[in-house]
Image: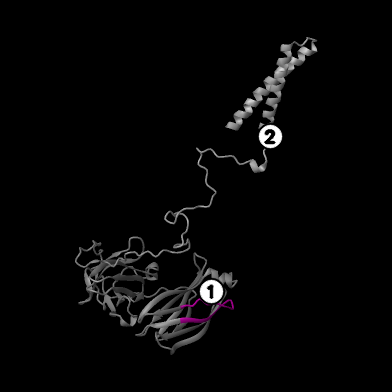
Amino acid sequence: MKKIDLERSACKKTLAAILAFTMALGAAACGAKETEETKKKKKKATEKTESVEHVFAKSMTIPDESETETEPDASIPFPSTETSTTSSDETDPFLPTDETSPTETLDIDYEEDLGDPIDSPDTEVPKTAEGFVMENEVIVDNDMYRVTFLSIVPHEYAERFVIYVKCENKTPDKTMWFEINDTVVNGYEADSIFIEKIGPQRKTISRLEIDGEIFDMGILTTIDQLSFVLEISEAGQSSLEDLLEQTFTVYPTGLTAEQIVIPERPTFPGEDVLVDNDQITVIIYSSGMNDFGDFDLNMYIENKTDAPLRCELQDVLVNGRPADPYWVYTAPAHTKVFTSMRLYEMTMQEMKVTKVEKIDFALCVRERGKNENLFLAPHEYKPQ
């Protein structure tokens, strides 16, 4: 602001000097005689003009680059360009410190939910739905643990069912895992996931959801018979030291084992039978692209023996090119299964396969845990 005011003042003085000098020249041109007073005024005007011109010229001089920096106004907070001299106890929270880098992950301990105290009130659960009689059915109970099926209801959003399960850990010092696996409904394998970790003297009430192709395909519309494997183990211990691993069977609708009717599987046109003997039946009943761009090889397996059977497709070739889908499936004893081998879209792109014309493989069937083959034969499948 000071520099601008100086320039304005210099301009005004210059104009005044030029006006005085012009009047003096006009008087001389008219032939007027200069008096002593006139000479003094002329001399004074000339000195003022020279002085003002000097000031104006100085103010309009382009400064050297080394002199361009001006002192900032103290009222404007300019950022400092000097190296920070912040003390160690005044660290910038937005800059990494020696103790923590931006790429490090901080270890934060979260309190693990290991259930509610055993003596606390139970969470309210839906009552058993119409058509079922299973309610507060104790599956296992001893000094260490107890498992109870409280109720069963249809799932609220899909063709499936929900069983509310109460698991209790009675021990004073052990943390336990409770798992339910290998669910079988009316002779057909179902899909389910159930696993709970429970602390000493604590309990949980959780949902066991049961679904699968048997409901999606309309083979079953209810659960008359449910078989499952209940496994209970101590956390941190080897699986060989399970506290319990046992198969249980319940009858949610009240029918007995003799009254249960196991429905026949649906058949499909163009089925390809891989093996059908007194031990096992394996059939490819359909195949094709799914909604995600993958290729599914859909199979029906019936295990007719008293032991779980492990089925595997080996040496798989797709359109004559080696593939590695790694398909292995274990069918529970006396169980019918619907399952699929999947070729993912990314795998087919890497193999440069745009259309599956044929699949070559060898079907291998063994008892689970044994090396002896019950069945091994090559096969060629061509999608319809």
Whether residue 59 is situated above or below residue 273 in the rendered picture: above
State whether residue 185 appears in this view. Answer: no
Q: Residue furthest front?
A: 36
316 in the magenta segment: yes
Judged from the image, the secondary structure of the residue bearing numbered disc 2 is: loop
Residue 120, picture quadrant: bottom left
- Mark 2–mark 1 Cα distance, whole angstroms, equals 90 Å
Residue 176: image x %, image y %? 28, 74
State the residue at coordinates (59%, 39%).
70
Residue corresponding to mark 2: 61
Residue 73 in the image: above or below residue 14: below
Give the mark nearest the N terminus, 2 or 1. 2
Indicate yes or no whether the magenta region holds residue 321: yes
Q: Position of 163 compared to 106: left or right?
A: left
Q: What segment carries the magenta color?
A: 312-327
Residue type beneath disc 2? Thr
